[in-house]
Image: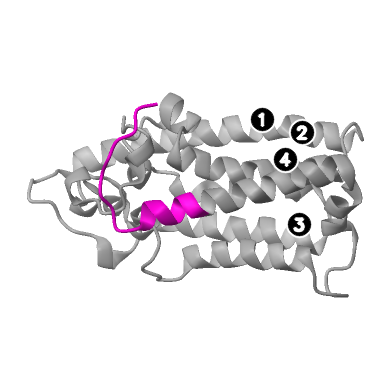
Amino acid sequence: MRIIKKTGNGVYYDHVIQFVFRAVVFIAAVYFYFTQRHLLEALVNEPFFDDFGYKQILWVIFMVGMISHLLPLKKVTMGIRKSRAETYTVPNEKFTLESLYSYVQDMNIKAWKVMLVWLCFNAVFAALYLANIIGVAEMILLSFFYYLSDLICVLFFCPFQTFIMKNSCCVNCRIFDWGYFMIFTPLLFIKSFYSWSLFFTSCVVLIRWEFVYANHPERFWKGSNASIKCQNCSDKLCQSKEPL
């Protein structure tokens, strides 16, 4: 992989720090899976409000991450901020509604392909879980793996970008805010406050994103939003992977 040296405003390095944190969390989860599996199962099997420990800390971290996507915070990537009215900038070049609608239609078809692939892929694990072939610990470990993979996609390689979406970079990604929904998909099948509170909050993030996209698609296309063109990008999330 060729490293592209670019300057940024710190968003890229924030993501690198988050990646290291998520890697530590995943490695710890793997360690406990093989040594003290009950600690993973305790995330969902034990009452949530009886005490305060590692599971509550993780829950707060996950919740804060999702809520930050819903609030008008400035220290988040343009991939999220592009959905907001205040970041929308009309490009100097003219664009037609026909070209915008053509882009929207193309991206919607590709997004549905990603959703279909994702649901079919996770249906395998759901079937294994419901058939008691794998258990709670495996589903939680899978969720932690997705937690790490989310930033692998942003920083290094994204199969959805490369093989389906074909967007130039993460800032221009149609499904950028689907991440938490994908992370917590395995938790849908585990009945507990811990798992369902995380999964259904991720659904709120997803629905909000899709609602804004449906009503303001012009904010999501670099042909109609100058803020997300490469020359205007300050995030530089593509420092460790080349844009398509």
Question: Residue 12 colored magenta?
Answer: yes
Q: Please tell me how crowded label 1 is: few (under 14), some (14-19), or many (20+) other residues with Cα within 10 Å.
A: few
Question: SS for tag 4?
Answer: helix
Q: Quadrant of residue 204?
A: bottom right
Spatial CA distance of label 2 from label 3 is 16 Å
Task: Quickly name the residue at label 2.
Answer: 125
Is residue 101 placed above or below 116 in the rendered structure? below
Tell me which residue sits at (36%, 46%) in the image: 237
Q: Nearer the viewer, residue 244 or 112?
A: 244
What residue span does the magenta drawing correspond to? 1-17
Tell me which residue sits at (82%, 50%) in the image: 190
Query: Which amino acid, mark 3?
Result: Ser
The answer to whether mark 3 and mark 4 are in CB contact below 8 A is no
Task: Quickly name the residue at label 1.
Answer: 121
Query: Which amino acid, mark 4?
Result: Leu
Tell me which residue sits at (37%, 56%) in the image: 11
Question: Residue 203 colored magenta?
Answer: no
The answer to whether mark 4 and mark 2 are in CB contact below 8 A is yes
Task: Quickly name the residue at label 3.
Answer: 195
Spatial CA distance of label 3 from label 4 is 13 Å
Mark number, residue 142: 4
Viewed as shown, does residue 158 lie left or right of 233? right
Q: Nearer the viewer, residue 221 or 146?
A: 146
Tell me which residue sits at (40%, 61%) in the image: 76
